[in-house]
Amino acid sequence: MTTIRESISRIRNVFKLVTEDAFLTDRFIYSLLLKHSKALMKRDDVVKSIMQVDTLFETLPYVELVEVDRIEAGCAGIKSGCQIMRTEKKLPELMTDSDGPIFRTIASIDGQDIMQQCRSAVYVSMSKSTSFKYNHTKYYWYKNGYLYFPNIDWDAVSIEGMFEDTIEGFCNIEDESCQKAQDRNFTAPDYLFTEIEQLTQQELMTLGKIPADTGDNSQNIMR
């Protein structure tokens, strides 16, 4: 897999740019790479095929939960007595597809119980069914950066997702899986990298109006 650092470095090398260039910060280059990555992944509808690619996903092994009310969880119509837990902290930004943020697994911390995604409105509707008491599936939904879990009393969950942002805020100091942001794998399949980088280079050429080598560098906004 290609790391974020390697992707940024390749773009810089194309234009022989130094780190001090004010216009082309690493963050800006990464934002362009990420934008084109998202567009190509949605175009090719690759989400189902990448679910087996371990290196594209990161795991938050212990995400603490807190109890919240039904109004906040977006399910005011749910029957009284339902306990709703929520991730205590907002999750790092995730890659998305047409169905929302990309998670591979949401589970109990021991991995024994795998949860199923649904929408809060769907859960409310299901809960009103007379047969719902026989439904032992554990559900979750995503809202405003948090995950919500009805009818569980767990202290924490394990989350495996395709994260855009660093997961440092959810790591223990001893956790070797937590890396510096630029050393993380870039969240896109390898076969898309050439096209992602080409589109990023084209956009930088347009934004920077980069002249030929014989041109006047004083006209280049990246200088």
Image (cartoon, rainbow, N blue to C red):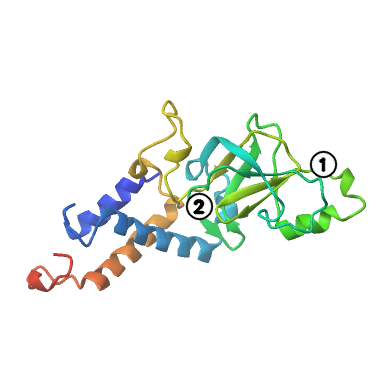
Disc 1 marks which residue?
136
Q: Is residue 32 left or right of residue 125?
A: left
In percent of width and height, residue 149 lies at: 69, 45
Q: Is residue 221 left or right of residue 34?
A: left
Residue at (43% x, 54% y) in the render: 191
Disc 1 residue type (three-letter)? His
In percent of width and height, residue 33 lies at: 36, 59
Residue at (65% x, 38% y) in the render: 107
On-image quarter of the N terminus: top left
Q: Which SS class for mark 2?
A: loop
Q: Nearer the viewer, residue 42 or 88?
A: 88
Disc 2 residue type (three-letter)? Leu
Disc 2 marks which residue?
94
Q: Are marks 1 and 2 in contact (CB under 8 Å)?
A: no
Distance from label 1 to label 2 (Cα)? 28 Å
Establish if 200 lies above or below 54.
below
Q: Quadrant of residue 100?
A: bottom right
How crowded pointer 2 is (Cα within 10 Å; few <14, some 14-19, many 20+) is rated as some
Residue at (35% x, 39% y) in the render: 180
Q: Which SS class for mark 1?
A: loop
